[in-house]
Image: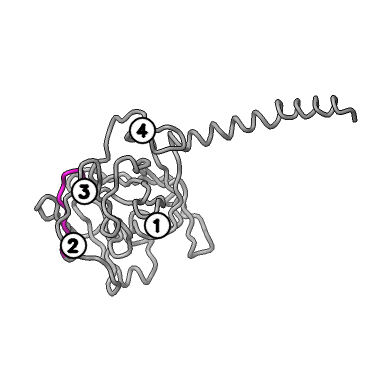
Amino acid sequence: MPMAKYRKRARQWWQKEIQPLLILVLALCSIRSSLADWNDVPTGSMKPTILEGDRIFVNKLAYDLKVPFTTRHLVEWSNPRRGDIVVFYSPKDGQRLVKRVIGLPGDTVELQNERLSINGRPVDYAMPDPTMGEQLTGAERERGVLATEKLPGCPHPVMAINGVPAMRTFAPVTVPAGHYFMMGDNRDNSFDSRYFGTVAREQIVGRATGVVVSFDKQNYWRPRWSRTGSSLESKPE
């Protein structure tokens, strides 16, 4: 085949097949980077609210608009609220994590024997919803202690696990300006701000609002249909 003819076919193939595909991939990646994304959950640090095998929807426009593929903010119109479940980059190693916002900038957060205090006021706890532990494993139901933590404006479930080493008490911590104190709902099995400190505002990716789909990895990855499409938004008091 003459070289000129080969080049012509290659150029046509690029223009008709590869270039449109690359544009589509770039557009989709930009949407995931700046507008909306999902996050697979590999651990139980947010149990019983979020389970291993959940794929959660992340609203990246909840607080701001970012430059695609960066954490640089173009415009900010809101800030995380106490009780929001957010996805952020860990200040420890840059890994994406999912936790709940407990302390806002300027707050003083304290934990004494698993009980939170915010700005010197102890947070109230109540009996859990009877259905809260239905999707936990048998061992978790046996060892776990469930409760409803009445975080101001955002009551939500929490879990403690008897017999495992964990940081159940820490001295008062004042959250610096532009930072947030994060904790997992599974208090005795969560690597969070108790260990790596507060999280800067610019490291927050977005707010987790619901479960897109869920698979039970302990049961041959069977779908958990009851969790598909479920909301992660707490109902305010």
Q: Secondary structure at mark 2?
A: strand
Give the extent of the magenta segment.
102-112
Sequence-wise, which precedes: disc 4 or disc 1? 1
Sequence-wise, which precedes: disc 1 or disc 3? 1
Instruction: Please tell me the numbered disc located at residue 170.
Output: 2
Mark whose residue sits in front, 2 or 1: 2
Q: Quadrant of residue 24?
A: top right
Q: Nearer the viewer, residue 227 or 41?
A: 41
Sequence-wise, which precedes: disc 3 or disc 4? 4
As shown in the figure, which amino acid type bears the numbered disc 1?
Answer: Leu
Q: How far is disc 1 from disc 3 in space, using C-alphas? A: 23 Å
Instruction: Please tell me the numbered disc located at residue 51.
Output: 1
Instruction: Please tell me the numbered disc located at residue 73.
Output: 4
As shown in the figure, which amino acid type bears the numbered disc 2?
Answer: Phe
Q: How far is disc 3 from disc 4 in space, using C-alphas? A: 22 Å
**Residue at image location 32% in from the left, 47% down from the top:** 85
Q: Which quadrant is the N terminus positioned in? A: top right
